[in-house]
Amino acid sequence: MLKNNFQLSSKMKISVDPQKLESFSQNHVKFYLKYSSFVFKALKKPSFQKFLRWMLKEEKIKEQKVRAVQVKVLPFRQKNGNGVAGKCNTARGRIRIYPKTIKFCQIFKQKFGLNNLLAYAGNRARAALIHELLHLKYAKDEKTVRELAKEYFCIFTQKQYTQSARSLFIYTMIFNTKTSGKKNPSNDSNAPRTKLKLNETCLRASSFFK
Ligand SMILES: [Zn+2]
């Protein structure tokens, strides 16, 4: 079955830099290993894989262009201290997906509970993979990638959970936390407007899904 070799899911693996592990405590390593295997499963879910194939087709991105998708065990921070969700080496076709830090997860869990944390972690990784796959086509056009990533993520979640309160919450967490780092003047996260925005996006998205 030659066709299977081109499937995205067969190019995915969990990856860790052994020398970096030494700077983490045993408990933290345990946490990040658990996190990465959870995310790995979330990304490999047949419904999501099916969606990605459709998205790649829609965008005319050849599956062969994706050489490797690495689910990194340890988080990555930029020099400015901001965490990174994903990276794409467009020349090599290599995508990396990074976790949130243990500290973030602990606070999140305290505030919103374990189920929401799991939903958030899985969907954040899905959104990151969608985003990085789009970079294979749009390269450095960050604005287009961000807009399209939102729309595609929306299509996927809409198909999965309909418009539930949780999916709205997760969407807001993933896409609003990203922009809030940029000292946005409209930073007061007022829920009704976010909801309106989401509905607009989903409406637009669902019309081109047909
Ligand atoms: Zn990007």
Image (cartoon, rainbow, N blue to C red):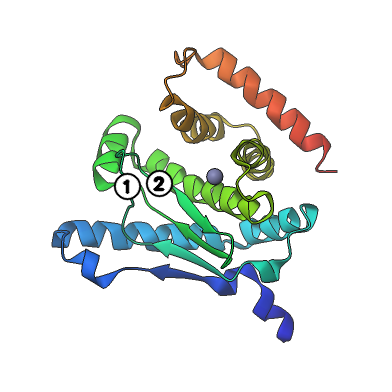
Q: Identify which amino acid the numbered label 2 is placed on.
A: Val
| Image point (82%, 39%), residue name | 208
Residue 25 locus on image (x, y percent):
14, 59
| Position above or below: 177 against 196 | below
Residue at (38% x, 69% y) in the render? 15
- The image quadrant of residue 120 is top left
- The three-letter code of the residue at mark 1 reads Arg
Q: Residue at x 40, y 46 (%)?
A: 84
Q: Quadrant of residue 93?
A: bottom right
Which residue position is annotated with label 2? 84
In the rendered structure, are the residues bearing label 1 and label 2 in contact, judged by CB atoms less than 8 Å apart?
A: yes
Looking at the image, which is closer to me, 44 or 74?
Answer: 74
Say which element carries label 1.
loop
Position of residue 113 measured from the top left corner of the image (x, y, whole percent): 33, 36
Q: Which quadrant of the frame does ligand 1 lie within?
A: top right
Q: Quadrant of the C terminus?
A: top right
Q: Residue at x 69, y 54 (%)?
A: 137
What secondary structure is found at the residue carrying circle 2? loop
> In the visual, does 147 lie left or right of 87?
right
Q: Which residue is mark 1?
A: 77
Nearer to me, 157 or 77: 77
Crowd class of label 1 (few under 14; some 14 to 19; many from 20; radius 10 Å): some
Task: Tell whether circle 2 marks a residue whose Cβ is less than 8 angstroms from ligand 1.
Answer: no
